[in-house]
Image (spheres, grey):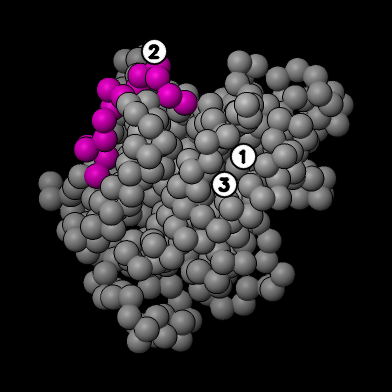
């Protein structure tokens, strides 16, 4: 009888590019030898994590896969909302002609729009377009003790610190807070149970993308599998305004992850195999070449064709990871932190 390999998943955020993670999860859920013990997620990673948690907690691996399919079908329909329309007013469609026009322009259309139009300009007409999706989540199951533990990261606007929501703290507002890009969505307000005061939140990617420290619990397995959807490396120096903006976006949303990995690296150099951090084994599933080929613009455009292509790319990357590194799970890290960070 094959012993199950228990892992923790850390799911990065990146808007529509989170469909890559959809594919990764779909492939992992196919493998009966792997058990998901815990999930941390930010932004799109939070949505993916909640979908998997709900599916596994109420049923089977297939339920989790079906739940992911349902959620991303819902996300693909977000473009019909009145708020998302402010983006499509500037980028009307995803046809090859429009894409050629975008590539020819020396500036970012969505960034220009963000400088001209604030989500607060909508006044009482404002509605977060993701709310119609998240409201349909089964929070009774998501907050239950069944299935993997789930941790969702958001950024406190007041002090810039990460807030981690778990168990019965997870709600529609918590997930919307985790995915709250301030140029697109109004800040999410959530009451702090300790103070009774409301705190405002922005996207968790600014402070924890994704949070790793909740996975260092000694009760959880050693293996942390990070699904990274923001390219770590680019060899070319960005020179056009659009390329510069894209790289700023990537660096910003990798900064929190790199900080956590640097802490992990420092502790493991001093205390390898000891304590809750020293025992952690790190793995990563990514496709930097694919993500480098996509602009930051596409993160805000949940085109069904793009989402399906990213899902298939995620499945392929997860398949290669399992083929190459599944034997390492529970034994050793498949990521060389020195090579990644130094």
Q: Secondary structure at mark 2?
A: loop
Q: Identify the residue position indicated by label 1 in the image.
A: 225
Residue 252 visible to the viewer:
no
**Residue 306 can be seen in this image:** yes
Q: What secondary structure is the stretch in magenta mostly built from?
A: loop
Name the secondary structure under disc 1: strand
**Which residue is more in the foreground, 24 or 95?**
24
Q: Nearer the viewer, residue 158 or 257?
A: 257
Q: Residues within 10 Å of mark 3 (few under 14, many from 20)?
A: many
Which of 58 and 12 lies nearest the eye of the viewer? 58
Q: CA distance from mark 3 to mark 2?
A: 33 Å
The x, y position of residue 326, in whole percent, is 67, 42
Instruction: Residue 80: say if magenta.
Output: no
The residue singled out by tag 2 in the image is 194
The answer to whether 126 appears left or right of 200 in the picture is left
Q: Is residue 237 left or right of residue 171?
A: right
Q: Which residue is mark 3?
A: 227
Q: Is residue 139 magenta?
A: yes
Q: Furthest residue to the left?
A: 124
Picture coordinates of residue 63 (x, y %)?
Answer: 34, 37
Image quadrant in which the N terminus is located = top right
Whole-number angstrom distance, CA of label 1 to CA of label 3: 6 Å
Secondary structure found at label 3: strand
> Residue 151: which numbered mark, if any?
none
Q: Residue at x 44, y 58 (%)?
A: 311
Tell me if label 1 and label 3 are in contact, CB under 8 Å.
Answer: yes
Name above or below for residue 324 compared with residue 99. Answer: above
Mark 3 or mark 2, earlier in chain: 2
Q: Is residue 72 above or below residue 248?
A: above
Q: Which residues are magenta?
A: 133-148
State the count of labels.
3
């Amino acid at each position: 009888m094959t012993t199950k390999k228990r892992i923790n998943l850390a799911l990065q955020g990146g808007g529509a590019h989170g469909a890559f993670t959809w594919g990764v999860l779909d492939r992992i859920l196919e493998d009966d030898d792997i058990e998901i013990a815990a999930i941390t997620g930010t932004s799109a990673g939070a949505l993916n994590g909640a979908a998997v948690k709900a599916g596994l907690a109420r049923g089977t691996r297939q339920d989790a896969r079906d739940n992911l399919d349902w959620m991303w079908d819902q996300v693909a329909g977000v473009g019909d909302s009145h708020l998302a329309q402010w983006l499509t007013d500037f980028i009307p469609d995803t046809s090859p002609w429009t894409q050629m026009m975008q590539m020819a322009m020396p500036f970012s259309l969505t960034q220009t729009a963000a400088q001209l139009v604030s989500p607060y300009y909508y006044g009482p007409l404002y509605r977060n377009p993701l709310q119609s999706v998240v409201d349909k989540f089964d929070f009774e199951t998501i907050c239950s003790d069944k299935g993997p533990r789930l941790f969702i990261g958001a950024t406190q606007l007041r002090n810039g610190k990460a807030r981690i929501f778990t168990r019965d703290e997870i709600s529609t507002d918590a997930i919307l807070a985790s995915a709250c890009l301030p140029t697109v969505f109004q800040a999410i307000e959530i009451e702090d149970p300790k103070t009774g005061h409301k705190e405002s939140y922005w996207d968790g990617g600014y402070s924890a993308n994704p949070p790793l420290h909740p996975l260092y619990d000694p009760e959880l397995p050693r293996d942390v599998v990070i699904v990274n959807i923001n390219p770590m490396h680019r060899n070319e120096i960005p020179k056009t305004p659009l390329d510069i903006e894209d790289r700023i976006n990537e660096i910003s949303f990798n900064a929190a992850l790199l900080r956590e990995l640097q802490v992990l690296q420092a502790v493991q150099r001093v205390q390898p195999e000891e304590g809750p951090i020293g025992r952690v084994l790190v793995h990563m599933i990514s496709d930097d070449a694919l993500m480098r080929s996509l602009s930051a613009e596409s993160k805000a455009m949940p085109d069904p064709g793009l989402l399906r292509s990213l899902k298939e790319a995620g499945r392929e990357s997860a398949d290669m990871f399992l083929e190459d590194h599944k034997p390492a799970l529970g034994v050793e890290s498949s990521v060389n932190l020195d090579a990644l960070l130094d």
